[in-house]
């Protein structure tokens, strides 16, 4: 039995701006570890395996929290949940900023992972207070600002860590998240719950999903180091299969599952998840390989760029990513999601193949990375917008949460695969990968991206007024 709620009062530009500010701040905080991982490894005396664990722990928590946050947002109201969730994120940011060792830093990253659940909650708030057409544009704006914030964090993390300290690298974006959360609390109207509140938490599903994601990330992050221990690697793979199978079985039978797998049987949601995964695998190659290529010594085939120079070279990509969301939202509204995704996939393939073919000048890498960033923003925003506006209002959080979890897993898989390609392409006794390893990584990413066109051609146009 459902409760009838009073109509939600319209959301204003200030409230959308507050959600956008929160997206920028969380995106920045999410991205600070990746570009500064070598610095953190030196300062905290971390082994390569420990560095890999640090780089993926936030993704693991985020992939776990996102569907749960979306479900709770549908059940209790997006604003109520997002404010509490961001309190956990702020605590995690402060723990990371004050961390004296790796163990405490890992705890801070686990808490910070809750930030990934903020996006589906923002979509719940937007859909609750805006007409369908305007909500598409607003979702595009919020998504684009999150991507832009992540790129800004990547650019600023190195200079802040080197100029101030690693502690300020975490503290500054945490302060921004705190301020944006206060704005959301003050400026965003409350949204009514869209699902019954009586159902309990699906604890068995939560435990099995946790085991599945943690094991998956361990296989991806430590697989290369475990090749010499095949029995351990096989054991992890078997454990992953057991967790995954058990989770699917439990969720299919649960009266109120935290992740409603029946959503995946809906064409709009299922295809969006598949496309998001493929596109993010392709995107992650540029995310990981381009900075590495900038840093290769100039007396070989690279440019020997410093952290500050690399940040400057990546700035066009950050700008492209930040405008891609709004452009995608407008494009979906006018042309439909299929047209936007098709254009994005083709643009990304051109960028990746261009990077493979031409990377002897700095502007080659700058232009290629910008094209990939723009294309990724167009595609992922279109997928999230299509999903959010194709399901019932009460299912918005669950459906978009599934897409965003797929995004996280796609990026994690892509980074690990391209990292393995560079490792395999590094000659014995050298620390510099062969140039052919970079070419292979870009070509493989382009092939995966083009493969997604097979799914795109089965999509409906996706225009929904």
Image (cartoon, rainbow, N blue to C red):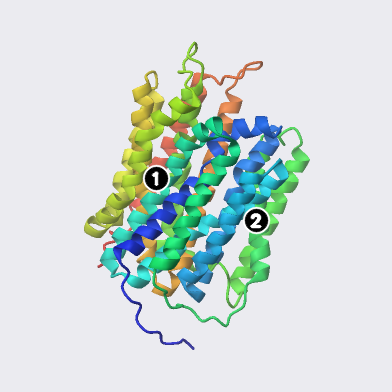
Per the image, label 2 sits on a secondary structure element best described as helix
The image shows residue 240 at horizontal and vertical percentages of 68, 52
> Does 405 appear above or below 172?
below
Per the image, label 1 sits on a secondary structure element best described as helix
User: Which quadrant is home to the C terminus?
Assistant: bottom left
* Residue 320: quadrant of the picture: top left
Picture residue at 58% right of the left edge, 50% below the top:
93
Crowd tier of the residue under label 2, counting other residues whose Cα lies within 10 Å: few below 14, some 14–19, many 20 or above: many
Q: Which residue is mark 1?
A: 148
> Does 320 appear above or below 25?
above
Q: Which residue is mark 2?
A: 212
Q: Nearer the viewer, mark 1 or mark 2?
A: 1
Depth check, front residue: 182 or 25: 182
Picture residue at 29% right of the left edge, 45% below the top:
343
- Say whether marks 1 and 2 touch (CB < 8 Å): no
Q: How many marks?
A: 2
Identify the residue at the far left of this view.
334
Identify the residue at the far top of this view.
299
Crowd tier of the residue under label 1, counting other residues whose Cα lies within 10 Å: few below 14, some 14–19, many 20 or above: many
> Does 408 appear above or below 424?
below
Q: Earlier in the sequence, mark 1 or mark 2?
A: 1
Picture residue at 42% right of the left edge, 74% below the top:
190
Question: CA–CA distance between discs 1 and 2?
Answer: 30 Å
Depth check, front residue: 127 or 17: 17
The image shows residue 378 at horizontal and vertical percentages of 33, 48
Depth check, front residue: 197 or 177: 177
Task: Please indicate whether residue 4 sits to the left or right of residue 211 in the image.
Answer: left
């Amino acid at each position: 039995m459902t409760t009838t709620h009073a109509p939600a009062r319209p959301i204003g530009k200030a409230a959308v701006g507050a959600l956008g500010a929160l997206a920028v701040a969380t995106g920045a905080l999410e991205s600070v570890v990746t570009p500064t991982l070598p610095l953190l490894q030196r300062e905290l005396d971390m082994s390569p395996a420990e560095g890999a664990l640090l780089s993926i722990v936030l993704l693991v928590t985020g992939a776990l929290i996102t569907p749960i946050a979306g479900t709770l947002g549908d059940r209790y109201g997006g604003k109520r949940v997002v404010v509490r969730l961001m309190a956990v994120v702020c605590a995690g940011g402060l723990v990371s900023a004050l961390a004296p060792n790796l163990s405490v830093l890992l705890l801070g990253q686990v808490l910070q992972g809750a930030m990934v659940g903020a996006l589906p909650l923002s979509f719940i708030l937007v859909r609750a207070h805006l007409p369908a057409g305007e909500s598409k544009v607003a979702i595009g704006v919020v998504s684009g600002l999150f991507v832009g914030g992540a790129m800004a964090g990547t650019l600023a993390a190195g200079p802040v860590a080197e100029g101030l300290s690693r502690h300020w690298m975490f503290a500054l974006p945490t302060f921004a998240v705190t301020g944006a959360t206060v704005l959301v609390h003050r400026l965003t109207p409350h949204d009514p719950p869209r699902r019954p509140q009586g159902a309990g938490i699906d604890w068995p599903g939560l435990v099995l999903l946790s085991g599945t994601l943690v094991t998956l990330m361990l296989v991806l992050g430590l697989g290369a180091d475990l090749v010499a221990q095949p029995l351990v690697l096989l054991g992890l793979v078997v454990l992953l299969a057991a967790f995954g199978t058990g989770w699917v079985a439990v969720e299919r039978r649960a009266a109120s599952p935290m992740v409603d797998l029946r959503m995946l049987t809906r064409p709009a949601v299922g295809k969006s998840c598949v496309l998001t995964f493929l596109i993010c695998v392709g995107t992650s190659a540029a995310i990981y390989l381009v900075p590495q290529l900038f840093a290769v010594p100039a007396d070989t085939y690279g440019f020997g760029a410093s952290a500050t120079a690399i940040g400057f070279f990546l700035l066009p990509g950050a700008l492209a990513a930040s405008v891609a969301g709004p452009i995608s939202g407008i494009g979906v509204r006018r042309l439909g999601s299929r047209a936007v995704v098709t254009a994005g996939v083709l643009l990304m393939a051109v960028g990746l193949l261009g990077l493979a073919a031409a990377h002897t000048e700095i502007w080659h890498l700058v232009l290629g990375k910008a094209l990939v960033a723009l294309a990724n923003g167009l595609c992922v925003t279109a997928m999230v917008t299509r999903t959010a506006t194709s399901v019932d209002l009460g299912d918005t959080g669950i459906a978009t949460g599934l897409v965003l979890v797929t995004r996280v897993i796609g990026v994690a898989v892509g980074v690990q695969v391209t990292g393995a390609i560079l490792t395999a392409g590094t000659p014995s006794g050298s620390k510099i990968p062969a140039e052919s390893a970079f070419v292979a990584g870009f070509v493989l990413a382009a092939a995966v991206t083009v493969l997604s066109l097979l799914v795109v051609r089965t999509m409906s146009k996706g225009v929904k007024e």
